Image (tube, rainbow, N blue to C red):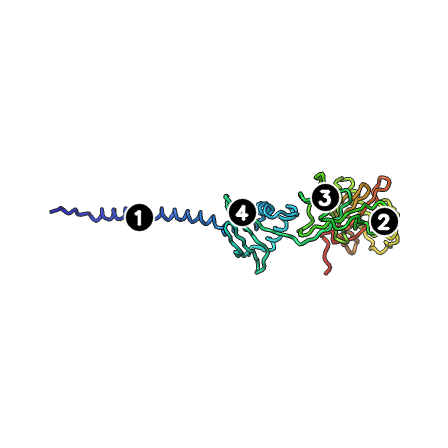
Amino acid sequence: MAKRIRLKPAFFAVLLAAGTACAAGISLLITGSAAKRFDAMEQQMPETALDAVLKKAQSGDLEQLYENTVKKYPSLDSKETYIRAMQTVFSDAGSGISTALMKQEGDTASYALSSDGKAFGIIELTKTAEGWEAAMPMQGNEVFSFQIPQGITAYIGNVQLDDSYKKETNIVPDNYFANPTASYVPAADVYEVTGLIDVPELTDQNGNRLGTLKDAITGNVLVGREVTDKETLQYIIDAAETLAAFPAQDVSLAAVSAVADTGAGWYRKYVTLPNYWFTSHSVSRFSDEEVHAIQQSDDTICSQVIFDYYAENSEVNRTWHIGYQLTFRNIEGKWKICDTAINNELNPRTEAPE
């Protein structure tokens, strides 16, 4: 008869605990392995990549999104313009962005973005060896007419503005509207580009940056060689402030004449303006001056100048936010104002009328 082995209760408890611990360990091992597999699978899901893209975009990190986008959808807009537009889009959308899957085929997925029920964009995800690559196609609806002086071949990126973009030839640039037949006026051709977000960067046939100014009256884009000489730019600012100072009786007409083409039509009208209406004041000053200028020919410059003018007396004080477009021509080695346009909306500090 076989001898029965009797286990002591304490030993049985220890054995049971060991078995339980072993089972739990195996369970944890299996659970941990499954969790890792789930995390890895989750990282491969397009929704996870989409969340990461949106977080970066909302924080202002748009560099990679831009690079991916232009690789897939080449654009004539500059990098700065494109990123600024995306920043505006995400800033307006705020934090409450909703996403909806539009289409998923193979290694691509497209999601519609909306905020407060309004659609504002699309994110396209493409599966690569490194993960999901996001692009956000954007196309502007702006149409720009570029008035380019003859003799300059202009490029937007690597795209030449050739005859396929040309709409008119041998025209007078808009900033010479008061003296269109003058001998110093440079001839220009008009090139039209559509589907832009904003005015793009232009270069010439040698890769040099070209300057652009939206005409203060028509909004057409004037093109020329960018003026960077500090002395010339300061002279333009001084001339603009001289024009503004005369109606306030802060300078004499002789000071205006010194910077003016005195045979120009604007000057003949300017000298007839009364300058006694302005309230007498004990303090006046200019501030916050900015200038951008382009040379349309060897003998002509178009510029836009903004600045603030402040005046006060014992009873009142006021600040004027001023914007001028001034065209200069070279007369005997000196730059003289030959055409003018006033548009205070050039100055971003101008307050809209109530």
Quadrant in which the C terminus appears: bottom right
Residue 42 visible, this angle: yes
Give the mark nearer the N terminus: 2 vs 4: 4
Q: Nearer the viewer, mark 2 or mark 1?
A: 2
Callout 3 secondary element: loop
Q: Amino acid at mark 1?
A: Ala
User: Alpha carbon of mark 3 to alpha carbon of mark 2: how far?
Assistant: 25 Å
C-alpha gap between disc 1 and disc 3: 76 Å
Q: Please name the residue shown 69% across and 49% down the image.
A: 199
Residue bearing the label numbered 4: 133
Q: Which residue is mark 3?
A: 154
- Which of the marked residues, 1 or 3, is nearer the chain's N terminus? 1
Q: Which residue lies most toward the front here? A: 164
Q: Is residue 305 visible?
A: no
- Give the Cα distance between marks 2 and 1: 98 Å
Identify residue type, mark 3: Ala
> How far apart are labels 2 and 4 at the CA level?
56 Å
Label drawn at residue 181: 2
Is there CB contact under 8 Å for labels 1 and 3?
no
Q: Position of residue 117 (x, y in %)?
A: 57, 60
Say few, some or many: other residues with alpha carbon within 10 Å of mark 3 (under 14 / 14 to 19 / 20 or more).
many
